[in-house]
Image (tube, rainbow, N blue to C red):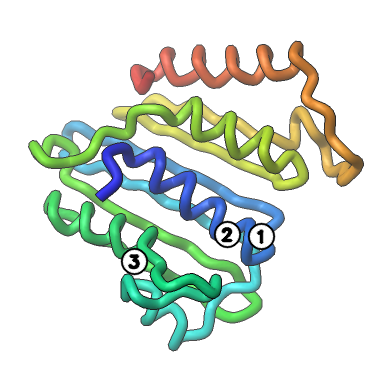
Amino acid sequence: MMEDLSLHILDIAENAISAGATRIAIAVNANEKRDVLTIRLTDDGPGMSEETTGLAFDPFFTTKGKRTGLGIPLLAQAAEHCGGKMSITSAAGRGTKVTATFRLRHIDRPPLTNMKGTLMTLVFGHPEIGFHYRHTQNGRAFRFASRRYFGKSRAPFRADPGLIGIIEKELRSGLEKIGAS
């Protein structure tokens, strides 16, 4: 099991990119009153057939030519272990939605920990992808869209230290404002 839920988010987003997604929406909702943490990733990739969607929970199934595909099964196991569940909704040609819920205060729930780092890795590792991030913490929301900084250009990207600092600061301060840092 991964020790940090943000690493699960990174893994699923990377899988979506490998499959051909050009837009990925990541939503995190922590609700203390309801004792629920929900993580949802939605992409515009090619989607999966009904058969592939069913096999995605099998740790010995992968479409990448390696021997195992542990990302989805490990996240599903973590969710179920913490009183939650995981679902995948997908259809060929229509993208995929992965949703995992956890009991927020479950003693064994892995922490979310480093969403800023995960988003920085995704945004600067894949500037051609449109990332939309919404994090809600007890009703207070923070939103981030990478297209605001990169537009729709697919031109070669060169990391500008000033831009890296601007995005890092926006993510850090946004998450701090809602109490999710």
Where is residue 116? Give x, y as percent.
Answer: 49, 26
Q: Residue at x 31, y 64 (%)?
A: 73
Mark 3 in CB contact with mark 1 (< 8 angstroms):
no
Asked if disc 2 and disc 3 are in contact, CB closer than 8 Å, the reply is no
Q: Is residue 18 left or right of residue 104?
A: right
The disc placed on residue 16 is: 2
Secondary structure beneath label 2? helix
Q: Which residue is mark 3?
A: 87
Helix, strand or loop status at disc 3: strand
Q: Amino acid at mark 3?
A: Ser
Percent across and percent down for residue 76 are: 27, 60
- Camera-side residue: 134 or 107? 107
How crowded is the residue under tag 1: few (<14 C-alpha within 10 Å), some, or many (20+)? many
Q: Sequence order check: which comes first, mark 2 or mark 1?
A: 2
Which disc is residue 21 wearing?
1
Give the quarter of the image for residue 146: top right
